[in-house]
Amino acid sequence: MRHLALPGLIALTFGVGGYYATGEFGLFSTANLLAGAVALGASAATGLRSLGELGAASARRVLAPRLLFFALAVVGGAGLEVAAHRSGSRLDLTATRRYELAPATRKALAELPGTLRMTLYYEALDPRTRRIRMLLREFARAGPVELRERLLDEAAEDVERFEIAFSNSVVVELGPRFEVVERPTEGTLLEAILLLSTPPRTVLDVPRGEGERSPARDDERGYAGLAHALRAEGYRLRERVSAGHPEVPEDTGAVLLLAPERDLRPEAYAALRRYLEGGGRLVALLEPAAPPGLVALLREFGFGLPEGVVVDPASGPVDGAPPGVNPIAFVYAQHPVTRGLNSDRMTFFSIARAVLAARKPTPADRLEALVYTSPRAWISPDVEAVVRGVLPPPPAGARVERTTLAAAGEFPRAGGTARIVVFGDADFASNRYLRALYNLDLVLNAVHWATQREVDITLRPKVITPNQAPLTPRQTLGMLYGLGLLLPELLLIAGAVAWQRRRGA
Amino acid sequence: MTPLLALVRKELLVLFGSPVAYLTLALIGTVTALLFFDHLRIYNQILFLYTTTVMGGFDSGTIPDYVSVRDTVFLPVMEQLALTLVGLIPLATMRVFAEERLRGTDELLFTSQLSPAQIVGGKFLATFVFVSLLLGVSFVYPATSVLRAGLGIEHLLAVYLGLFVLGLGLASIGLACSAFTTSQLVAAVSAYAVAFVLYDFGWANSFVGESVAVVLDRLSLHPRFAGFAEGVVSLADLVYFAALCSACAVLARLSLDWLRIR
């Protein structure tokens, strides 16, 4: 019966190999595993009888210490592994440090009101699950997170309950509430956690009706991404048609102006002015063609808004536009809004106007620039040419200097201290550019500062764009012949020479 | 030269005195090159499709995030290379102890100045050197291509380290199996069986409970390698492979007494 061991091992190998190949136990794998197990069992039973030969005292004397040493090696190794596992010591060597959680994620996990359950639903051969599994483990290390995994095929009830449509989906549960994340990344998981753990506590008033950008639109020009991110961070967006309802409601945390194309009605401006004089908060995203009434209102608070488009030759041609008209900012003022941003954490603007911290209306006011261009920038009055994709030359006498793309101010007034943040571009927070560089952090931190939620100012996970670097067919073939096949060929030649020498000897 | 190094040298000379070593090295180099070339070709085709105007082009965000040199080419090839190691390394380890015992030359070794532990250590060391060569040959072409495509040297080193420790673990299993038999065939087949079973206990998940599955997962070779493949070098994974190699070496040492007594 002992000769059955070898066929048994072969059957076992093919049984498990069949499983690796198909990801399931088919007839082939199951039959092989069963046959292998039976053969090995029979062989082992025969082999056990021969162990009696080892029962002699002399044999025991030799083998016992060796067996003890082996047992100690196994137990010691297991103990060390457990200790190393518990220590969590590891190095993330990925180019983008994708398994190091962002400060925002760590903060959200540390502040969880209870245990969070994250369940990964996947199909057996989905190659993406490994990566998300590793990411989820990082979440579990950083906070009270319970991880689970379910095969989609075996979780029909959950699939129906959570309406899971795709493999590699994560269901995040906190108490009775849940969010389904279909494309799990650190960023999307964080948003789900924030949506569950942060109840809406600040109302953002979003005036509409004068050509403002829509927080509901999910195309490239829309602001649905910003609206979703704001909701995740505890804001409730309330749209208001300013023509019909000019007054800013009392419960407003801040007014969010998304690039109106036309002037608001005079009564709406008057209401906004009253709101601000009473200690209100405003975050205004302007385009170069901002309506004059709004520009005039902001100038009353000391913001300088020169007409024209900022051209910064330090920024190359980005997104198909002429060089310089889409400034990439990397110089920031020391301000809560720009906390954590530096020359490595850039922000991207698309056809922006300058916003200057020009003149404080009263000595008690604080007015500060936030985001700077390079010192080589100038302002072109020819907005039409830039919008058409033509780079106008600097006009005669144009001042080439560092200018600013955003500014913020605090204005103590009788009714309270108003806070205003003005950006010279609205596109930077649109769906197309919101996740570019650190745009999301800049705009969200501006809203946090305006609404006096400085404690929520942080840096969020970045979206990692995979490297797309195709090699030409010639390069691909060249490397196959030059490296891929040449080396094995040389090795075979060396082997043939060694063999012939050996035969000759 | 110390007796230990002399033993290592002798083992390597025996290995490279026959065409088997060269054949194994050439085989893994060719298999990796062809696998890599095939994945690269498919990746380029996918990119071509996505960049045509019909499907949107690079700027439209139409390329799924899993289509990249890293995810579409490098990592799948490294996964297949890991599995190739399971197939090839037992071929290199099967003869190390078994052949010596079959020919009776092991008795000569025992009469040398080397202790049984040193004999085992020397054979393990020589095999580890061969595993390093095996990986070096298989890695040149993918590494060069991927570096050109910008994966990042640190990630590449992590994957290489993962393959290296996986190779050492598989070699240790193969050597332990070779140490208990006089037949190279039995040594190779038993090494395959142990390595295949231990490679990934995912197959056992259907039969065991969740808590047992977690333990089995921590015993498996492949999930350990997966961490390195993702660019994460964990102390626990390094300790696991070190413990596996040590346990196999102790087992091989035990086999010397075991077989002598029998």
Image (spheres, rainbow, N blue to C red):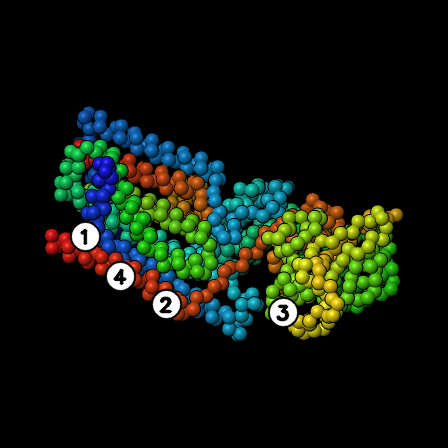
Residue at (18% x, 55% y) in the render = A498
Task: Please give the name of the residue rendered at 65% of the width and 73% of the height, measured from the top-left corner.
Answer: A389
Instruction: Give the letter of the chain under mark 2.
Output: A
Q: Position of residue A186 (x, y in %)?
A: 56, 51
x and y percent of residue A266 in the render?
A: 87, 64
Q: How many numbered circles are shown? A: 4
Check residue A402 in the rendering and tell me which mark sits there, or answer none: none
Q: Secondary structure at mark 3?
A: loop
Residue located beneath label 2 in the image = A477
| Residue B97 screen position, x and y as percent | 21, 42
The residue to which callout 4 is attached is A489
* Residues at discs 3 and 1 in contact (Cβ within 8 Å): no
Residue A321 numbered tag: 3
Residue that numbered label 1 is attached to = B18
| Residue farthest front in this picture | A397
- Mark 3 on the same chain as mark 2: yes
